[in-house]
Image: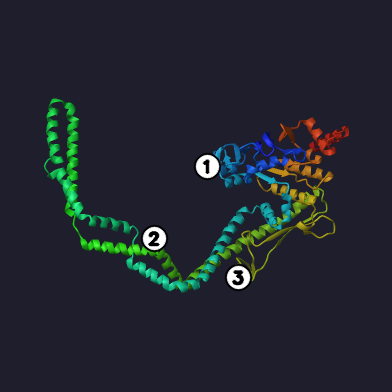
Amino acid sequence: MLKSLYIKNYALINELNVEFDKGLTIFTGETGAGKSIIIDALSMILGERADSNVVRKGSDKAVVEGIFDIQQLQKIKNFLLEHEFENSDALILRREISLKSQSRCFINDSPATMSILKQVGDMLVDLHGQHEHQSLLRTETHIEMLDDYCGLHSNLEEFGKAFSQASSLLNEKKELFAKKQQLEEKRALFEFQVHEINAVNPLVGEEEQLERERNILENSERLALESNQVYELLYDGEQSANDTLGQIAKHVDLLRTIDDSFNAAGKEVESARSIIDELATFVREYRAKIEFKPERLEEIRIRLGQISLLKKKYGGTLESVIQHREKAEKELALAENFEAEIARLDKDLSGAKALCSELAQQLSKRREEGAKKLNKSVIQTLGKLGIQSARFETKISRQEVAQADHAFVTIGKQQFRSSSKGIDDVEFFISTNVGESPKPLSKVASGGEISRVMLSLKMDLAGKDDVPLLIFDEIDVGISGRIAQSVGTAMKELAKRHQVIAITHLPQIAGFADTHYVVEKIEDDKRATTRVRTLNKKERITEVARLMSGEEVTDAGLQSAKELIEYSVN
């Protein structure tokens, strides 16, 4: 559950800290006071995109921070552990939106990506905004709602992988046919290029090795001269290093007989003589190996010239030459084995289609079973919300296709159009009047009915998922009176299983609050600022009365508000 929300320098909000509790939390206030700004700010820490325009004038950045109690939410704890975030019973989500740089996200004070923040937010909160009920008017959202109700996430993921594999194989097959003519046209060129490169047959790293050997052969005379001089200085010349160290050793030995503190110096002299011996041996052996090979030098120069020519023609490096040969050989092999490659793709595609067909049927079966239960549940909930004669139907349809290549799903002799969600099209139908047949929800429902259908779906889905917090931003649009009271009752019932936060302008809903906040806009130093106050019992009655009768609150209004609140408690 959400324990607290801190907002600073966000739109009309200077600084705000709101504490939350279990049950149903209601926000009320005048239009434009900033109720929805609070929900917008909350959505920022749930992974929604941020705009620097929300930063309050005169400030460099806006900050939103929410603290959640996740003690009982093992799924989120496991997710945090998996992504190496600090794990405890308290989860802190923070967002900083700057005028000068990109916004920053934090989970438990550690930097996080927007993607990770959104994944955590989706597990914590189901936010139903002011206009979300309009999504019911878009039939493409209906399948998502049905799948959520049926709990098909793992099934959809499995089918999606199979569908992606089949799509990839089909695209590969199409590309192969498209390349067939091109391969035939370029076959002679590829053969020439492979032959040309193979004639030289360059090896990875060969060029560096040849250049080193060429450098040594070109400088063999100098190497012989220099190494000879080094050997003479070390060992063979007058006053060589070896002779000098020998004399030094005699003097140090004499000193050691007088003062044993020269013992260490004697060892160092011996070590130096040993090093001189080793170095002299190396130089002598190296000098003995030096020989001038004009034939080998010419071979190397010719070889490097051949490699240089290949590099100019095929990419500029030896690695690019070898890669080009491999590509050309692959294209030639494909041209020579085109039919075999098509047969392989056909076999793989057939297997992928068979898997798609099996998984699609499983999806369809579970949707059909779930749709029956959803229809019944929504009808019952709509009855409680004042639509007594409702008929609600979830219609599932499929579209046949003729082209076998494009049909990943075959059932019997029928082939069906498919997408990453399977072969089903889902649309909600409704009738709210006795004797009328259900028609598409998007064409017949009023604004108030749409809101109640959405609330019904939310209530039915709430029993299927483990999202702890539900937020409703003016879901009561288009309803009033007795129906509003039914909606309040439904939200109160929902709050027994989830923490619920709602923004409303209807007293019949506000009366059900376990915690009631009023959002106010005040002007200080000619600037508007939003603030939030917690209402006590007496203030609640006054606020509900204001919602009922307007700014002028009468004794009769106060009495009606008191009765409404007492009714909601009972």
Question: What x and y, as percent, mark residue 151?
Answer: 65, 52
Which mark is drawn over residue 160? none
SS class, disc 1? loop
Quarter of the image containing the N terminus? top right
Which mark is drawn over residue 316? 2
Question: What x and y, as percent, mark residue 273?
Answer: 17, 39
Question: What x and y, as percent, mark residue 448?
Answer: 80, 50
Is residue 83 positioned above or below 142 on the image?
above
Badge 3 or badge 2: first in the primary sequence: 2
Question: What x and y, as percent, mark residue 338?
Answer: 48, 72
Which mark is in front, 2 or 1? 2
Which residue is located at x 85 percent, y 56 percent?
434
Quarter of the image containing the C terminus? top right
Amino acid type for the residue under numbered disc 2 = Gly
Badge 2 or badge 1: first in the primary sequence: 1
Q: CA distance from mark 2 to mark 1?
A: 44 Å
Q: Which residue is mark 3?
A: 404
Of 522 and 471, nearer the camera is 522
Q: Which residue is mark 1?
A: 84
The image quadrant that residue 89 belongs to is: top right
- For label 3, count other residues whose C-alpha is less than 10 Å away and answer few (under 14), some (14-19) or many (20+): few
Badge 1 or badge 3: first in the primary sequence: 1
SS class, disc 3? helix
Is residue 497 positioned above or below 166 on the image?
above
Amino acid type for the residue under numbered disc 1 = Glu
